[in-house]
Amino acid sequence: MASALATSIDTAALSSKIVQFTDYLIENFFLPLKACAVKTPQPTPAPLSIPTIPAEDVLPGSRARVSTLRRDCLIRDKHRCVVTRKFDKQEARRRYTTHGQNAVDDDGQVLEWTNNAGFQTLEVAHILPHSLINLEGSPHMVAARKNALDILNMFDMDVHRLITGTDIDRPTNALTLTTECHEEFGSFRMYFEATGPPRTYRIASYDLPALSMVPQPLTRTLFQSPTIDSPHPRLLAVHAAIARVLHMSGAGEYCDRILRDTEDSIAVESDGTTNLGTLVTLRLNGWWDGVSA
C-alpha cells in the first residue's frame, strides 16, 4: 500500500511546490529581515523627566520613541551590555565629570579607571525590527509587511501582537548591547536560548569563535527592574528560531551573498543571471533603502 501511495504522488510537482515555498519564505521574510539588520537608530537617551511626546512623534520607530526606549533599556540593564557586561562609555564619562575616580556603577561599585577598563559605546537593539510593523506606504509595501507578519506567526502563533503598533518600541522588544554585539545579534548570528530560571539565557553564536563577541559557553541572567519590563521570552525565542533556520538551511549565507551585491556592482553569476530583480523588489517593498550597509 505504501508503494502504491508513493507512486501516486507526483514527486516532481511536490519538489516544485517546495522550491516555490522556500523562495517565498526567503523573498518575503528572511531576506527582508537580513536587509533590516541593525537598523535601530541611536538618538541621545531621553532625560529622566521628559514632556509629553508630540502626536507626530508617536509613530513606531520615531526618534522620540527610540530615545525613550534607549533611556529605559540603559536604566533597566544598569548601563551595561547584557552580553559582555561592559559599562556605557558615555555614562561613565558623565559620572567621572561629576564624581571623578569615585564614580560608581548602578550597583554602587566604584568604576575601574585603568587603561583596559573596557568602557564601550552601548546601543539599544530591537529583538524583532520595527520595520516589520510599518504598515504605511505604497500598496506593495503594505502587502510586503503583512506577508512578513504572516510568516512570523508561523514561528509562534499570534506573536505579532507583542510588537503591534508602538509595542515594537517597548523594552520588552529590546536589549542593551555594544555596537559589535548589536551587529551580531541583529544579523541573527547571535541568539538567546532560555535555560529554565527566570530571565536566564544561554547566549550562543553561529559566527566563527574568532569573530564572535560571545565567549563560549555563556549563560547570563538578564537584569531586572521594578518599573521597566524585561525582554519578552517569546520574542527572544522567535529570534533564536529564526537564527537557527537561517543557519541550518543555509538561507542566511544565501541572503548575505545577495546583500553583498550592493557593496560594489551587481554581481553576475556564472549562468549570466543577477540578483538585480531581488534587490529592486526589496527596495520597492521598503525593506532596503538602496544603500549598502
Image: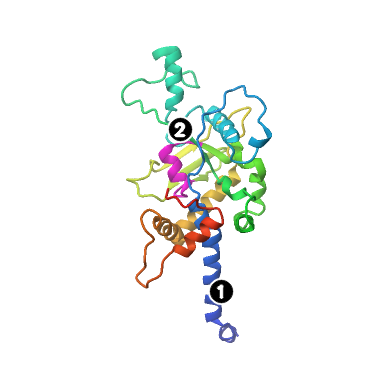
Picture quadrant where residue 266 is located: bottom left
Amino acid type, callout 1: Lys
Asked whether 225 or 219 is in front, the reply is 225
Quote the CA–CA distance across marks 2 and 1: 45 Å
Q: Which residues are magenta?
A: 176-191
Asked whether 90 or 154 is in front, the reply is 90
Q: Is residue 213 visible?
A: yes
Amino acid type, callout 2: Leu
Graded by Cα atoms within 10 Å as few (under 14), some (14 to 19) or many (20 or more), the crowding at tag 2 reads many
Res 247 label = none
Residue at the spot of label 1: 17
Residue 259 in the image: above or below residue 269? above
Q: Is residue 93 magenta?
A: no
Res 122 label = 2
Graded by Cα atoms within 10 Å as few (under 14), some (14 to 19) or many (20 or more), the crowding at tag 1 reads few
Image quadrant where one finds the N terminus: bottom right
Q: Position of residue 17 (x, y in %)?
A: 56, 74
Q: Position of residue 227 (x, y in %)?
A: 63, 28
Q: Secondary structure at mark 1?
A: helix
Picture quadrant where residue 56 is located: top right
Name which residue lies at 45% across and 13% down.
98
Position of 236 compared to 183: left or right? right
Name which residue lies at 40% across and 13% down.
100
Asked whether 144 or 205 is in front, the reply is 144
Q: Is residue 187 magenta?
A: yes
Name which residue lies at 56% across and 60% down.
28
Q: Position of residue 245 (x, y in %)?
A: 49, 58
Q: Earlier in the sequence, mark 2 or mark 1?
A: 1
